[in-house]
Amino acid sequence: MRFLHPRRQMLPPVATEFAYLAGMEGIPWESTNRWEESILVIERAIDESGNLYIPWEVEGHGQLVLSTASLMERDEAYHLPLELARGTLNRIRNYAAEWSQAGMLVSENLQAKLAAARTDFVNAATIQERAQDAAEMAEASIRSGLDAMELLGHEFSQQMLRQRHERETHIPALLGAEIPTLPLTGTETEHFQATFNAATIPIRWRDLEPNPGEYSWDSIDQRVQWCLESGLRICIGPLVSLDEANLPDWIYLWEDDSDDIQATILRMVEAVVQRYQDRTHIWHSAARLNIPGVLSLSEEQRLQLAVATLSTIRRTDRNTPMTISFDQPWGEYMARELLGLSPLHFADALVRADLGLAGIGLELNLGYWPHGSLYRDLLEINRLLDRWYSLGLPLLTFLSAPSSNATDSLATLTAQPLPIASGDSPNLTSQAAFVDRLIPLLLAKHSVHGIFWNQLSDSIEHRFPNGGLFDQNRTPKPILSRLAELRQGHLR
């Protein structure tokens, strides 16, 4: 498929690498992308109709992934800005109509912004032969459409939250962050206890079992006891993740034998569950197994490992709820690697196996590339949540967003924080604004039972650069006060 962009130089640097085509379910097709002068060519092995997803910079909104409507394959190049304007307008009109029919009030301000987007789109569509002028008018339509989309997402969140509070004073959801180590400073303790009603205690295998069969429990024991004394709900895990920073060095001795690797992992899982089964409220069984890790395990072997991990937990602890989380839940990595299972299909296989899963975790590390996900608008995130909730299980969200693009020597991933707009680096304000936009939507969704921040502090080793709630000097960031306000306003 071919897409004309008269102002190719305006695209974000990651656009060519990231762009992909996807079908009705949003699952990317593997493709190769290249430019032929001002035309983006995307080649796939199939010729089905699909939607193009591509990063786009929009004045007032920064860099977001936008999508076209469904397009058929043809020889003639599509006018890319025009098709993105059509896709944006199509999405906002569909959501506005759907939510209006459900009884949600659509404000006059929103209707005015939608009308402006429609007018600009019509003007762009009628002058396609003047590619530059059409692009400028399409950009105006996209801008107005995203203005309407942001307002619609905000109005939906506020109205749904009011409805929830009419039925229940406090929303019964978990709001937490990880406790990777102790001790915390007095300031960290005060802010944590004032902000969160839950905590995650990650299991770092290389620290737990530095030598085969020799377990060091002190760190986990201390964190579990601290959470219990603080009155926090406890989520232990992930028990299994194949990240390089998590795996003990000695595991590579068995790298060529998947059976031995699985048996070794399950032995560790069983030991953890036996020790803490009476002191945790949720088992986070495994994370990111949908994505290839540093061990040379096939997709089928990683699925088998997920099944075996859940079975081991349930065999040892018959009562505590179990969840498993998935990274890059839009599946954008599939556009560059031939895989048989999308994240959603991977999860569906586990749900259908009836292993006792009580929830599904979505890792939304927004504003990072690679390894994370590019920023999406609220309606696209809402659609993602609805799509995953079709599996019939409650959702837990694991979040992070950058507060800076400064060098972060303690980050274990090579992911780069993305600019929020041309020339504008992520900052403390943009990280707090991320919470202001996203958390109300998550709290408004009955499907979301837990919201966890992935990284507590930038002062200790962590996955994503500058994504903590405390900076490298262990000083609280503005995001913490916003989270505390949201907890006080909506949760127990």
Image (cartoon, helix red, strand yellow):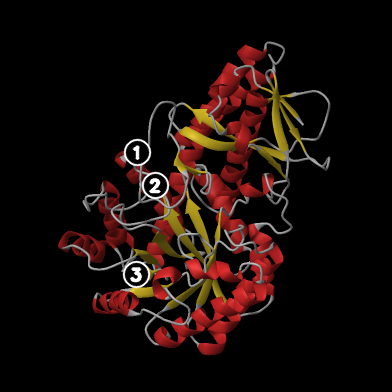
Q: Are marks 2 and 3 in contact (CB under 8 Å)?
A: no
Q: Is residue 2 left or right of residue 366?
A: right
For label 2, the SS is loop
Residue 10 is marked as: none
For label 1, the SS is loop
- Compared with 336, 113 (above or below) is above
Query: Which residue corresponds to mark 2?
Result: 465
Q: Quadrant of the N terminus?
A: top right
Front position in the image: 413 or 309: 413
Residue at the farthest front position: 253
For label 3, the SS is strand
Query: Which residue corresponds to mark 3?
Result: 198
Which amino acid does the dot numbered 2 rest on? Answer: Pro
- Compared with 129, 245 (above or below) is below
Query: Which residue corresponds to mark 1?
Result: 406
Q: Earlier in the sequence, mark 3 or mark 1?
A: 3
Q: Residues within 10 Å of mark 3 (few under 14, many from 20)?
A: many
Q: Give coordinates of residue 429: x percent, y percent.
A: 31, 40
**Gap in angstroms between the C-alphas marked 2 and 3:** 24 Å
Q: Are marks 2 and 1 in contact (CB under 8 Å)?
A: yes
Front position in the image: 387 or 77: 77
Q: Name the residue at 73% across, 40% down.
A: 31
Quadrant assignment, res 392? bottom right
- Compared with 465, 455 (above or below) is below
